[in-house]
Image (cartoon, coloured by chain):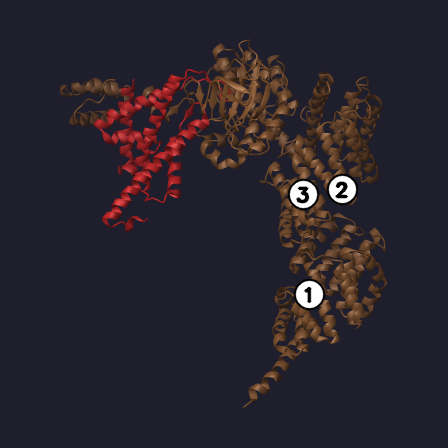
Chain colours: A brown, B red
Amino acid sequence: MKHNFELGPGDWEALRELLQAALEMEPENRSEWIESLGPEKDDFKPRLRALLSHAGNSSSAAILDTPPKFGPEPLAAAGELDGRRNGDLVGPYRLLRILGQGGMGNVWLAERDDMLQRRQVALKLPRVMTDRAQLAERLAREREILAGLNHPNIARLYDAGIAADSQPYLALEYVEGECIDVYCSRKQLDMSDRLRLFLQVVRAIAYAHASLVVHRDLKPGNMMVTDTGEVRLLDFGIAKLLEHGSSKETQFTRMTGRVLTPDYAAPEQISGKTVTTAADVYALGVVLFELLTGVRPYRLKRDSQAALEEAIVQSEVVRPSTAVTVPALRRRLRGDLDTIVLKALKKEPSERYATANALAEDIERYLARQPVLAQPDKRSYRLRKFIARNRLAVAAASSVFIAILAGSGVSIWQAREARIGQQRAEEVKNFIESIFRDADPFSSGAEPTVKGLLKQAEDRLIGRFARQPSLRVELLTTLASAYIGINEFESAENLLNEAVGIGKSELGPLDGLTLRARIAMTTVYRFRGQLAEMQAALEAIQTDLQSADTVFPADRLLAAENSAHLAIDQGRFTDAEAAARDAQRIALQYFDEYSEQAANTAMLVAVALTFGPNPESAPEASRHALDLALKVHGAERPHARVLDARAILGKSLGNAGRYQEGAVELKQVVEEAAQLLGPDTAMIGFYSADIARFLLETGDLHGSLSYSQRSLQVLSALVDADTYTLAAAHYNVGRAQLALRQTESALQSFLAARYGMTEARGRDSAVVRNATAHVAQTLALQGNIAEAESEIEPEIDFFRDASGLLKFHGLHVAGILKRISGQWAAADELQRAARAAISDGDIDARRRALVETEFLLISVDQGDFEAAVRRVNAWSRTLSEAPPVTPDDADRLLAVGRAYLGAGRPDMAIAPLRAVDSYWRDFDAQSHWARDSAYWLSECERVLEQVLRPRADAP
Amino acid sequence: MSPEADDGQNDDQGALESVDSFYEDAYRELRQLARARLRASGRNTLLDTTMLVHESYLRLSRNSELAFPDRTRFLVYAGQAMRSIIVDIVRQRKSERHGGALARVTLNSQPANGMAGDEDDILRINEALEQLAEVDKRMANIVQMRYFAGLTEIEIAEALGITDRTVRRDWEQARLFLADALK
């Protein structure tokens, strides 16, 4: 290279000055100015002209304006890479040569070593950092699913496993060809040819989606074209395989870039939300954009991964027609192609093409010069309005859509598994798509309801497919499931009756489709509360499931879930737990560990445990269910499933005696429910009642009262006065009032509760008797002993035969009254029986304290102060010394003080009595409890003075 | 260790050594980040040197227990370091490409086209910059900081203790000199 700067130091300065002067003038004046320079500058003139020729848009100067550019990573020297070389064995495969390398790992051409199959494969050796056992299991599961993908345009996955040195490997069909973008530009394909080639891609993706496989990492590099012009898609499901387990390495991936290149990732993938088939539709949109325009759909301010991710999630995609400069090309793209591409590239998954097939069909329509179904963007305004007006209906519609997707999945799965003709699967799909096509909400003025849509479908089914019983059964069941989704149980039942009838006579009761209809029917029974029918049907189904050979996983799962629901509804919680765990196993076996199914079944397990005989283990299971729900549904905004899961967590904590934690969770539930559903929904009423219950146990009595009142207020707007629900709300308010010693209002609340419960459950029901016990307790606190006795006396035998809290409350109150009337032995016996009805756990801490107070008072009232002091000495310090939080605590400390005082230990009595006195001064200085405690304190002080004075007066 | 405390001879020596080892750390850090970025991307890449430099500065200033030079001195150093890192990477890649004439297939099946020429540009700019440094060290320094480390005119001006107008003027001229050398 010539030396460009050969100038002396003085010359350099002179040259720079001249150059600066030239740069500061208008470009067109520069050459004239150079000529005008004196002859002593002649040496500089050629140099100046040369330099100034680069000013403005010189390409050489422009190189400096972009950051350093790099090509892709070079391949390593032939035959060796990452410590492996030609001829090495990986699992049963012998490496032949390197095919490629990249951030995710390397690919070798390889051959099976055992000569069983002399087939050459592309052997992928991914770099994965994850637990080996976990990966092995996942590889096995995925291998099973992917091996079922049998399509001429999809490269086969032959094998996957882990070699002895822990290297996972995937053996794929070896495809000779080039990437679709390279192929298009090398062949200089015109737009129609590009679209036709791309159609092969879309159709293959649609096939995979129908088999419930999402690609997740579609990009031109995975779309090969052979020299005969056939597309082969690579790497199905592999992204998912590699993605998992690396979630722990986020720090690592953040530093070195994620495993997947973000260039073709959908917004929901970037933001880490649930990935569905819609993400593949998005990636197809990016590739189509690139094939049509030669550029990517985003204009970036900066070239960095962060900027790209930001653009994908936030910025609007430019129209393909505005991304090109050639006018003819621009004209061709404008209109339908713009619309098609932009619809595939919607940020919101639900606004994209619902299926890859729909995208394919629009491209075909375009090629056939028919109008495309996608609508330009101005319609989205109307769609938003439609959604705004029909929130619930749209939510239901998406559940319909899910049912339908699952439905067509069933046929295709069965077509493969049971060798039923492919034709039926196609027909199911066409039928369903026709309903959606014809019900375009914008084609006519009227907006369809989901129900209307389903009715339309039902009408269309009348008299059709009579000679294809499987098809008819499947369509009937699919529609029925959709009806269940919108709570139209009667329509669902009619359709299912027909489906089961045809299924049993034409296909046999053990046929997969017949079973599907039978299982769906149990859901109808469940929502209708027909538990006996549900039980009979489920028992028969569980037996048949064992001998049936073709059962779709989703049906097997539903049967198990319904068995769990049934057991929960019947109060058989141990059975419920077993059924729920069964459902969970099925969900994990056939679905993703972070799938909705996994989350739902985890939740069922949590519910069964929470209300079952061993609630201590429930919080852990509930926490797990909540974590899953958050993973599946996202934590950014409230989601009904997440709320349910958190509510169960809250309840399980409370039921395990962890009242404080439980109240915290439930308060969050109430807050989020108010955001999600509005402030006056039943959910808020019920959970506020639970919060009130828990706060009562923590001693936060005012909090308890306020939540119980909120619960009552919300529920009384929603339910009738004579319902159990409203009565229970009154009862909760009463308990808080009673604990606060607001006896007048407590009595009113308990009487209202008892009235409602009598109306709803009858006067001999347990809940009414429980209310009676509380009425009696309130009367007793008011000093109305005779009336209290007349309430409780007739019920004592009932309470003796009862169990749990019911027994405790009844006998405890009866015992208090016996003590007050001086029947010490009877009082003692009743409190012992009450104590035996409750547990030793945290859950009953407050109730145990109440019984202890009574035992103490029985001794104190009898004047047996020595026994009383012995009892106090046996207590924990919390019980005998902690400052009172509630009036019940104050009662207990007062009894302690009286015991010491009676036993001649005023020095020990003074502290508790002072604490009680000051407690009541703060709490309710006018009450008779305040007067009582003031009296006992002054008694104690008087005695102390007598004890001290003689000593003080002593000489 | 705080710089104010370094008043003794030995302490000065210690401070100098730790600054040296700080630069070693910085160099390693920058190189690792750059390689990781390129490897992760796999395909043709514009190396976002601006982000690299700022990120490594933040990481080092948070982690380093060593005497830590101020930001401006770090930026001058970063220009020099990034230049040698980038040139090293390009040279290494060139020799690897030479050895293995293989086509790229799956995983990242983009064939190696186009950008190899851009890597040659980097080497040519490096050579021209060496020559420029012989006649005008400051100008070369500015190019180094702007092109290789992606710093802004303001940052360069602060680091070199000159005005941003001077930086802009030098840069405009440097573009022309280098373009002429590259043609």
Q: Chain of mark 2?
A: A
Q: Nearer the viewer, mark 3 or mark 2?
A: 2
Point out residue A604 in the picture as x, y percentages from the top left corner: 70, 41
Rendering quarter of residue A10: top left
Q: Are marks 2 and 1 in contact (CB under 8 Å)?
A: no
**Disc sitting over residue A888 in the figure:** 1
Residues at marks 3 and 2, CA–CA distance in whole angstroms = 22 Å
Lower position in the chain sequence, tag 3 or tag 2 = 2
Which quarter of the image is occupied by the C terminus of chain A?
bottom right
- Does label 2 lie on the same chain as label 3? yes
A278 relative position to A104: left or right? right
The residue to which callout 2 is attached is A575
- Mark found first going from the N terminus, 1 or 3: 3
Q: Which residue is mark 3?
A: A644
**Label 3 element class:** helix
Of the residues shown, which amino acid type is indicated by label 3?
A: Asp
> Is the residue at mark 1 from the same chain as the one at mark 3?
yes
